[in-house]
Structure formats: C-alpha cells, structure tokens
Image (cartoon, helix red, strand yellow):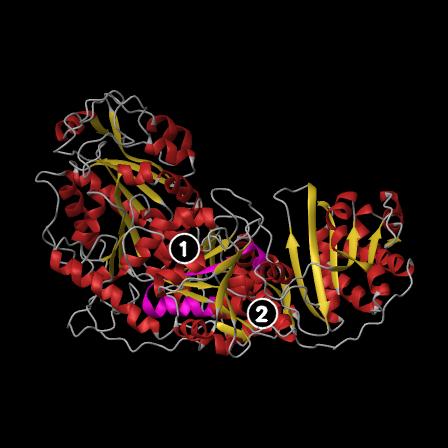
C-alpha cells in the first residue's frame, strides 16, 4: 500500500485481483481527504470484496452476506459523526442484498456504497452473479439464461441521488469518483468494474480496458433522463463516470425534530420526561 | 363483573372497549380486558371481554355477567357463557328469544344521535346506568378520546343510552386512584424507554405491530430512531449496526419474522452485539393464526441459529412484568453483549390491565453494572480474552481506538482468523459469560400451599390465570401450588428442584401442543412432568380451562368462584 495512515499488510486475495487496485486507491483517497481512521466506519458483507475493511486501518464491521447495507445505514442513523463506507461485492449488493439495495436508495441515508462488480462469484469459485453476462458459461458449464442486473439503471429508477461507475484498472478515474461519492450528501452508489483473475475469463482487465470509456466532459449529471439512457448503454462500449448526482434531503435532514446534529447515541431520554408521559395512562 | 362485547370487524368494538375500560378505570375499578380479533378489516366476528372488580383482576374468566351483542353471531357464539341471571343487551331487531334479554333500540338511538356508528357509545351509556356509575365520568373520557367534530353526537348517544334503561346494580367501588391502564404492548414499549432504548426497527407483523406503532408515534417526542425495515432480515441487521455504533437497540416481530431474523441472531452471538429481540407469539407454523395467541416459540427461541453462543430468553408474564423485563432485557443485553429474547404473545400484547405506576428508577437499576476488564493488553482489543468472558466494548469514533466486529471467527482484534487455537479460545470466552449470567437469573414465582401435593409449572402469560386457579383450589382445600417462570433460558432450577421434591405429581400448563416447557425442564434437569394441560386452539387459557384440565386428572373438581 502507498500510504501509512490506512496501511495494513496481509490480504486473502488472489495475486493480480482487482481488489488490490481498489483498496490501494481507497486508502489514498481517505488519506487525501484527511480522515482520521477513528472517524471512518468501513462496512462489508461476506465475500472477497467484503474483506476490504479487514485490510484498512479504520473501524470495521463485517456483517452477514447481503446485509452490509442495513447495518451501515443504521450505524449512520444513530451516529451521524461517522463517515460510513460500504465495500462489498456484486452478489452481496445485488443478489442476496437486493431488497436492501432497493430500499436503502429510497432512504437516502448519507453513506457511500462501493460495489465491487466482477460479474462472477469468486469466493465460492466461479458461479454466475447477478451482473454476469447472459449466455456466459459458469464453471458447471451451464449457460446463464438470466438477464444481467443493471445496477445504475435500477438505482436511478429507485431514486438514487448519486450513481456512478468506474473501473479498478483506471485508478485516477476511480479515485476521482470515490472522492465525489464520499463527499456526496446522501446515499452514493459506485459500481466498480473489476477483473476476477481466477474465475472470470471473459470480463478481464483487458476486456474492461478495451470496452470502457469516460462520459463526455460536457455530460450533464443532473439530468435524470440522460442518466437513465446512458445507464442502459452496456455492451461493446461501457461508459464510466458519474451518471447522476443531485442534492436531495438526506434521511437525517428529513427528520430535523429527531436529528438536530447531536448524534442519537449522545442523547438520553430523561426519567422526568418518561414519568410525565406515564401519567397520561392514569 | 365480566362483560363481553361482540360484533363484526369494522363495528368499532376496539374503540368502544377502549372508552369503556377508561370509564371503569376512572370510576375506580380494577380492569382486565382482552381482545379476540379475526385477521380481517371488515366482517367476521370480533369481541372484547372486560372484567372489572373492586379487587385486583389479572386474568380473564369464561362466565359472563353481561353480553352485548351487535349481531346474531355474537349471541350464538357466547350465549352459553352468559350466566342464568346474566344480562343480554341487544337490539330487538336481532329477534333473539332469550329470557335474559334487555332489548334496547340501539340502532334507532344511534341514528337519532347523528350516526349509526355511535352504537357503541349508546351501549356505554346504558351500561353506565345499569351499573350505577357516574355519567359524567364517561363524558369526560369521551371528551379526551374523540376528535372535536365527533364529540357532540357521541355525547348525545351516551345520554340516550343512559336514559334508555333503569339502574340494575349498585356496585361497591374501591375507588382505586393513581393506577395506570396499560396494554401489554404499551407496558413493554414504556419498559424499553426506561431501559434506555435508542433504536427500534421492525417490519409490521401481527401481533407485534402495536410496538412499532407506539415507537413510531412517539419517535420525535422521545428522540428515537424508529425504522420500518423492508423485511425482518433488514430489521435485525439494522439493529445490530445501531448496536455496534453505540445505541441500545431492539427489534419486534412475531414467529415468522423471527424465523427470518435467525441468521442475525447468530451474528449478534458471534460478534457479541447487544440486542433485544421481542417475539410476540402467535400460533404457527408459517402464517398460522395471525391474530391469535400461543406459546409455541419457546424451544425455537432457546435454540434458533446454527452454532453455539450464549443468549438469554425471558418470557413476559403480565403487564408489570412487560415493563420491568423489557427494561431489564436491554440492560442485560448490554452488560453481557448478548442477544436477549423476550417472548410475549398476542394475548398479553393486546390485553389491557390496571397496574400500579411502574417505578422507572427501579427498572433502570435492576441490573448492576459490570466492572469492565480490559484484558490486560496495552492496545484496545474489542474481543480481549477476559476472565468474565465479557470484553471491553467501545463506541466507534469516540476514541482513537478502532472497533472491529466480525461475523467470521476472529482474533482479539476482531479480524478474521482460521486459527484452531483462537477458535477454541473465542468459543470458550463467549461461553464463560454464562457463569456470570447465572447469577442474574430470576427464580420462578411461586403461588400456593407451602408443601403442595400437586405442583403446576408454567411460564409467561398463563401465570396469572394459573395463580388464580391455584388460589381457588387452595380455598377449596386442595394442596396445590404453581411455579411461574419468567426467565426460562438459561433455566433457573433452584425453586424447581425444591418444590418438585415435595410434590407427588407435577403438571405443566402450556399454551402449545407439545409441552415445550416440560421438554426444556427435562433437558436441563432430567425431571419430567406427570402430565400436561395444553391448549393450542389460538385462544388463551382461562382460569376455567385450568380448573377443568386439573379436574380431568382428578384434582379439584367443581370449584366455586
């Protein structure tokens, strides 16, 4: 790793895995943004991508497969002083956790979600994932007859206020998008294309390098219709960049009577208030 | 006095019963009120049963003094329970031929008052007169309960009802003052607030939804995070995220939702995250009987989840218990960093009772704080190996120490490990918490003869009905006693062994089909009941059911009230 503050050593990833680029870039971004490790909460579910929080010097919560988002948003709800970042895979984010993905977009809690999307199940050794290409062949030799899940299109349809895609092999681009996502007030999704060197022999580093291109310099990220159209562009050419970003009231901002800036965990209900309330039942 | 009010869903039984309970409370009586509802919004048959007395009443009985029938079905279903000298209040239009009938033109009087929907309030007016209560009390309750625009017609209706009958009774009033009227769900919610609740998440599910409704309604007033989750899996994982971040967290559901939460229960176990899980039981499996009652999740609560970890299961016995045990559960979860399961059921959640005002201070102090052992290391270790098994828990972001939680087996730092040695140390560390927890267990409450020939064992919400049956039998000269468990897992066994040694026969009284408490006792103590009194039709065991059940074993027989 490149910087000391967020530096840790050993990982359980395969040599050449796209996750190295992601964790190294993220560590650099966190350092650039001058976070203290104790201010950060990195949350993961289960899978190779979800192990990222184990390798970064910060608070870490490794929950259940598919369940990173509920734990992450609730931690933020009760302690808004934490910067909460979810790192977890495509199976965790869009498969097992699909329902949480849909509904946490609607909540718009101020967290960042980096979905490491390698279009394959790595830790269980090569099954198709929600984002696998149709007719891709998994390790059992079966053709994937399901249509690929479209994270950005679905996020936008559900009302996401920040939706972006980047590629782990383009570290400069990834760092820029990560920073914007972390700064964004509200739920921010970044779908990060990354190669799985062990099991995905089609969507390789070379494949993504050849097919991805950056959204144009004059692209208007505040126009939902354009964002919806461009998010459907996925084939020979795969656009990367911030597809959509708007400011909408966050979960906390929508409830000013409850969230006044002091984190929930620092407030207590007084016994007097409760006693007064009890008297209403007399 | 025992009054039953029945009609179809949508007839306003719930509203009417609420106003009547409050009127009786304000008139100075002890009240115990239960609900029997179908899982539908309109039609069918619903009823409320309100028992009141100058002596404390803590359970329901079968025999009725007054039956108020909005429809013929109510008469058909309940007339057998109406005493020979009881009173049937109904509209003459029902065409019921019964010598106990006191016909009142309910529908006409309601329409004259301004709306057919005031029929319940006409009944209240009639009851107030019949029972010799003060009409002004009922009027005050109406003013407090109803919106302004509906008030005039209801005040007219209560007067018309009052004028339609002659006074039949002059009841002694104990003039009970300063007591609270609480449903089981309200008592539990208030107990949670006393226990320091900061976060509540749930997915609506009968009969637990009243908890979610309560917390959502008062979230701003009490400054709580209350979140309706997209499913129960989200609810429990949210609660665990909130708990990790430093908030006392609770979820509420019924058996089906708890089934979905089970993997999260295991996460609380291995990651040592304090959480309280309330299971307001209903008959299962799967959808079962959604609006009815049962105690059939006992063994499921004790053993749910793969793997092994300490947990505690508390069954809630009555309204005061619902308050104190919920407050205690939150504190025990926090102290031992374990999941605590609270078992309630539809019967308790939806029934209302007069209770002494709960003591908030007592609830808060019911669990002594633990002197935290940091494990002797220089750096902070979330899962430090300590003698007590309880490791230091810090709030992330509050200090420079980093807090790591992991659903994988982990090191003292909280990072993944597959070390055989650490695995065994970690399992043992978690299990050690049970040694201290054993000192927290509350023995079952005993009612009855000092050296009983017959011992009953029960748990949770059958407690007060069992106790009332025992007291009646004792008065009748039967040597009988009952142990009522609140804490069930780990199972406290001291009093159990004590009384078991004295009794010639032991019967478990349970609201399930497979005698689950009996099984648990056998598993933990090698003691086995002589037989069991079981009910699993979705309706709560009454005092009479218990007496009949014992009579079938040759104990007691016909016992006067």
A150 is higher (above) or lower (below) than A107: above
Dividing the image into 4 quarters, which one contains the C terminus of chain B?
Answer: bottom right
Q: CA distance from mark 1 to mark 2?
A: 24 Å
The residue lying toward the viewer, choosing from A258 and A229, is: A258
Mark 2 element type: helix
Q: Residues within 10 Å of mark 1 (few under 14, many from 20)?
A: some
**Residue tagged by mark 2?**
B467
- Report which quarter residue B298 is drawn in: bottom left
The residue lying toward the viewer, choosing from A9 and B140, is: B140
**Direction left: furthest residue:** A15
Is residue B224 left or right of A134 when viewed as pictured? right
Residue A104 percent coordinates (x, y): 40, 44
Q: Residue at x 42, y 66 (%)?
A: B330
Residue B200 percent coordinates (x, y): 46, 57
Dividing the image into 4 quarters, which one contains the N terminus of chain B?
Answer: bottom right
Task: Look at the image and give the residue range highlighted in magenta.
Answer: B326-349
Marked residue nearer the N-terminal end (1 or 2): 1
Instruction: Identify the subunit bearing mark 1.
Output: B
Asked if residue A196 lies in the magenta stretch, the reply is no
Residue B49 percent coordinates (x, y): 70, 57
Per the rendering, the mark at residue B299 is 1
Mark 1 element type: helix
> Is residue B144 something that shows in the picture?
yes
Asked if residue B328 lies in the magenta stretch, the reply is yes
């Amino acid at each position: 790793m490149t910087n000391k503050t967020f530096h840790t050593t050993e990982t359980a990833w395969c040599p050449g895995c796209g996750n190295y680029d992601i964790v190294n870039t993220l560590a650099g971004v966190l350092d650039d943004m001058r976070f203290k490790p104790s201010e950060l909460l990195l949350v993961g579910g289960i899978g190779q991508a979800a192990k990222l929080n184990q390798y970064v010097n910060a608070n870490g919560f490794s929950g259940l497969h598919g369940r990173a988002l509920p734990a992450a948003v609730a931690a933020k709800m009760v302690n808004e002083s934490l910067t909460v970042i979810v790192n977890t895979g495509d199976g965790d984010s869009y498969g097992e956790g699909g329902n949480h993905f849909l509904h946490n977009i609607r909540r718009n809690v101020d967290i960042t979600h980096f979905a490491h999307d390698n279009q394959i199940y790595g830790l269980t050794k090569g099954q198709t994932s929600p984002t696998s290409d149709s007719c891709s062949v998994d390790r059992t030799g079966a053709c994937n007859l399901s249509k690929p899940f479209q994270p950005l299109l679905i996020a936008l349809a559900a009302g996401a206020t920040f939706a972006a895609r980047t590629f782990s092999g383009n570290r400069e681009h990834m760092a820029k998008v990560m920073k914007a996502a972390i700064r964004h007030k509200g739920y921010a999704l970044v779908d990060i294309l990354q190669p799985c060197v062990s099991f995905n022999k089609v969507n390789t580093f070379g494949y993504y390098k050849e097919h991805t291109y950056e959204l144009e310099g004059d692209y208007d990220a505040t126009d939902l219709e354009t964002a919806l159209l461009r998010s459907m562009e996925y084939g020979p050419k795969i656009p990367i960049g911030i597809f959509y970003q708007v400011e909408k009231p966050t979960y906390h901002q929508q409830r000013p009577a409850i969230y006044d800036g002091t984190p929930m965990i620092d407030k207590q209900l007084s016994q007097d208030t409760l006693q007064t309330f009890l008297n209403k039942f007399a | 006095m025992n009054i039953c009010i029945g009609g179809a869903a949508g007839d306003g039984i719930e509203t009417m019963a609420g106003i009547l309970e409050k009127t009786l409370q304000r008139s100075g009586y002890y009240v115990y009120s239960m609900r029997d509802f179908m899982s539908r919004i309109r039609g069918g048959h619903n009823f409320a049963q309100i028992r009141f007395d100058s002596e404390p009443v803590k359970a329901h009985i079968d025999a009725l003094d007054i039956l108020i029938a909005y429809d013929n079905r109510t008469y058909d279903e309940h007339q057998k329970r109406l005493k020979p000298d009881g009173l049937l209040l109904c509209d003459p239009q029902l065409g019921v031929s019964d010598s106990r009938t006191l016909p009142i033109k309910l529908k006409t009087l309601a329409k004259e008052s301004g709306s057919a929907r005031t029929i319940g309030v006409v009944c209240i007016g009639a009851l107030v007169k019949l029972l010799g209560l003060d009409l002004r009390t009922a009027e005050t309750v109406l003013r407090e309960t109803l919106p302004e625009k509906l008030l005039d017609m209801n005040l007219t209706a209560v007067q018309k009802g009052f004028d339609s009958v002659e006074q039949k009774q002059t009841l002694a009033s104990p003039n009970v003052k300063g007591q609270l009227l609480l449903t089981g769900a309200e008592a539990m919610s208030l107990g949670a607030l006393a226990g320091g609740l900061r976060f509540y998440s749930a997915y609506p599910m009968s009969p637990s939804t009243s908890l979610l409704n309560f917390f959502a309604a008062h979230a701003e007033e009490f400054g709580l995070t209350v979140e309706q989750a997209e499913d129960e899996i989200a609810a429990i994982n949210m609660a665990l995220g909130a708990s990790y971040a430093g908030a006392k967290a609770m979820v509420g559901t019924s058996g089906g939702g708890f089934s979905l939460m089970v993997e999260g229960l295991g996460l609380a176990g291995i990651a040592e995250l304090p959480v309280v899980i309330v299971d307001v039981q209903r008959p299962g499996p799967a959808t079962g009987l959604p609006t009815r009652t049962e105690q059939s999740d006992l063994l499921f609560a004790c053993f749910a989840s793969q793997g092994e970890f300490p947990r505690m299961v508390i069954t809630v016995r009555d309204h005061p218990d619902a308050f104190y045990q919920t407050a205690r559960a939150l504190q025990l979860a926090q102290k031992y960093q374990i999941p605590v399961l609270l078992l309630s059921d539809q019967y308790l959640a939806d029934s209302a009772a007069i209770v002494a005002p709960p003591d908030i201070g007592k609830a808060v102090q019911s669990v002594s704080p633990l002197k935290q052992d940091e494990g002797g290391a220089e750096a902070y270790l979330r899962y430090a190996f300590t003698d007590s098994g309880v490791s230091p828990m810090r709030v992330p972001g509050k200090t420079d120490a980093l807090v790591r939680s992991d659903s994988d087996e982990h090191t003292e730092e909280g990072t993944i490990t597959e070390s055989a040695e650490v695995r065994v140390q970690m399992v043992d560390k978690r299990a050690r918490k049970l040694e201290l927890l054993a000192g927290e267990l509350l023995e079952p409450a005993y009612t009855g003869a000092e050296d009983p020939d017959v011992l009953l064992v029960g748990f949770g919400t059958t407690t007060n009905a069992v106790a009332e049956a025992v007291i009646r039998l004792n008065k009748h000269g039967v040597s009988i006693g009952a142990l009522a468990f609140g804490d069930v897992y780990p199972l406290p066994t001291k009093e159990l062994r004590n009384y078991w040694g004295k009794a010639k026969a032991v019967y478990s009284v349970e609201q399930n089909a497979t005698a689950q408490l009996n099984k648990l006792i056998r598993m933990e103590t090698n003691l086995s009941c002589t037989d069991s009194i079981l009910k699993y039709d979705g309706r709560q065991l009454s005092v009479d059911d218990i007496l009949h059940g014992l009579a079938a074993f040759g104990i007691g027989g016909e016992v006067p009230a």
